[in-house]
Amino acid sequence: MRDYLARVSRHALVRTIRERGVELVKVCPGERVLDAGCGPGDMAARFAGLGAHVTAIDADPAMVAVAAEIPGITAQTGDLAALHRPGVFDVVWAERVLQHVPDPDRVVGNLVRALAPGGRICLVDVDWTGLVVDGVDDDLADQVLGVFRTVVPHPSMGRTLRRRLVRQGLTTVEVTAFLGVSTDLADAAAVIPVLDERLVPAPGAWFSAQREAAGRGEFLMALPVYLAVGSA
Ligand SMILES: C[S@@+](CC[C@H](N)C(=O)[O-])C[C@H]1O[C@@H](n2cnc3c(N)ncnc32)[C@H](O)[C@@H]1O
């Protein structure tokens, strides 16, 4: 998991989305930032580098142990569904977390309540229902991608981010959609689990069809990722 997250962090699309999010939340030195569902803490490190006081929370103690090694941040194990830190943070960042939680509205509510007056929240998530692969048989692609969507608890999370913030009473919410497109199978498989046979069990025909498409120079995949930024 740690290797996968490290590959995702290095990917050009993820770097582009993070740059835009960082621009929009405008973290100032001395501000209090929460990296919610921090994983190994890449964004926590980024905000600490901007001079913020960063708290990084994740449900997985192994991730927290990695994040805790970043100088200057406070890393804690915790379930965001139970987060109760009202009015504490100037900026809350939650990236690719909500697709995994059982009750996303509850978590978004806790995150919005954690904002101090004038605080900003940035949510980033994928819309797996918009993942398409071309160059392989359409029926096979529909079958495998359909099964993959049932594995992720909330596969359409990306497109729902804005409304979840609006439901929590935020009136200023800016949403941006990024469409990642790759014609390089190795590049795509590095960040899309359903293209990586080490990560997802799928018929062997699925992976061989992709390799054949790549061999013909016909492979293409596209995936939408959404970023929503709201202000308290
Ligand atoms: C795909 S990773 C993303 C990590 C990090 N945000 C990043 O962008 O690299 C999702 C993370 O959310 C964490 N997570 C999932 N459910 C959670 C919950 N209820 N409370 C806290 N963390 C949670 C997982 O442990 C995992 O580290």
Image: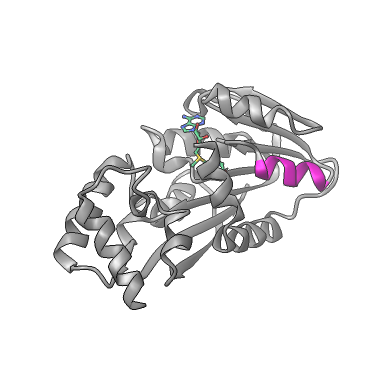
Instruction: Name the foreground residue: 118 vs 133.
Output: 133
Instruction: Name the foreground residue: 107 vs 69.
Output: 69
Q: Residue furthest bottom?
A: 217
Q: Is residue 179 visible?
A: yes
Q: Position of residue 106 (x, y in %)?
A: 43, 33
Q: Position of residue 142 (x, y in %)?
A: 19, 60
Is 59 magenta? The answer is no
Q: Position of residue 230 (x, y in %)?
A: 58, 53
Instruction: Name the foreground residue: 63 vs 76.
Output: 63
- In-image side of 166 versus 102 (left or right): right
The residue located at (33%, 62%) in the rendering is 130
Instruction: Please give the count of numbered marks on the rendered protein.
Output: 0
- In-image side of 55 versus 191 (left or right): right
Image quarter of residue 54: top right
Q: Does 91 appear above or below 110?
A: below
- In-image side of 189 versus 91 (left or right): left
Q: Is residue 91 visible?
A: no
The residue located at (30%, 57%) in the rendering is 129
The residue located at (61%, 54%) in the rendering is 10
The residue located at (49%, 39%) in the rendering is 108
Looking at the picture, the colour scheme in use is one colour
> Would you say the magenta stretch is mainly helix, strand or loop?
helix
Q: Residue furthest left?
A: 139
Residue range in magenta is 42-50
Q: Does 38 appear above or below 23?
A: above
Is 49 magenta? The answer is yes
Instruction: Name the foreground residue: 177 vs 172.
Output: 177
Q: Does 5 appear above or below 217?
A: above
